[in-house]
Amino acid sequence: MNNLYCSLFIIALCVGLSNAVVKMKNSVHFMNSLGGNNVLKIHCISDEDDLGYHLLKPGEIYEFSFYDSVMGTRINCDVAQGIEFRFHAKFMAYKGGGLIGHYGKMNFWFCRDDGIYFTHDDPKLYKWVPTMPLTWHRLLTDMNLSLNKLL
């Protein structure tokens, strides 16, 4: 019985110490590696937040960090490029572990002319898909604006 109490005490001590360790945030990074003067538009939405629209000039990086949710964190992103952002790709940029959270996980996405690559020189994961022509109505709808707010 004494050994049982001792074992439970050691387990409780280990769990307590593991929670005391500084837990690093996870992060997602996007780099505009497009040629020419192509601007990259990024819009990411997590299970809990809309991270808004971000425009990157060639060579610029957009990054954000967060802690995993107990229910499992998923971050879906839509990236677009080209004249009037006519080419885009939608994908899950991050998927958390759920009950077993990740700490310090970094996802790097490189957006190039021929597709979107995950971390360094891995094979291309996503191709650019043509979208319908951009109209003022669609632009305002995408950015959650209305003409009344602009006037």
Image (spheres, grey):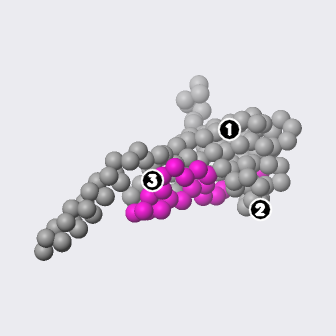
Query: Which residue position is annotated with label 3?
Result: 68
| Image quadrant where residue 32 sits | top right
Percent across and percent down for residue 20 are: 34, 47
Query: Which residue position is annotated with label 1?
Result: 61
* Residue 68 placement, left or right of 120: left
Q: Residues within 10 Å of mark 1 (few under 14, many from 20)?
A: some
Give the CA distance from mark 1 to mark 2.
Answer: 21 Å
Whether residue 88 is visible to the viewer of this picture, yes or no, is no
* Residue 31 placement, left or right of 146: right
- Residue, x 59% and y 25% (percent of image)? 151
Query: Which residue position is annotated with label 2?
Result: 123
Mark closest to the chain's N terminus, 3 or 1: 1
Residue type marked 1: Ile
When the figure is inspected, residue 3 is found, relative to residue 135, above or below; the finding is below
Give the CA distance from mark 3 to mark 1.
Answer: 22 Å
* Secondary structure of the residue carrying numbered label 2: loop
The foreground one among 52 and 71 is: 71
Q: Which residues are magenta?
A: 86-107
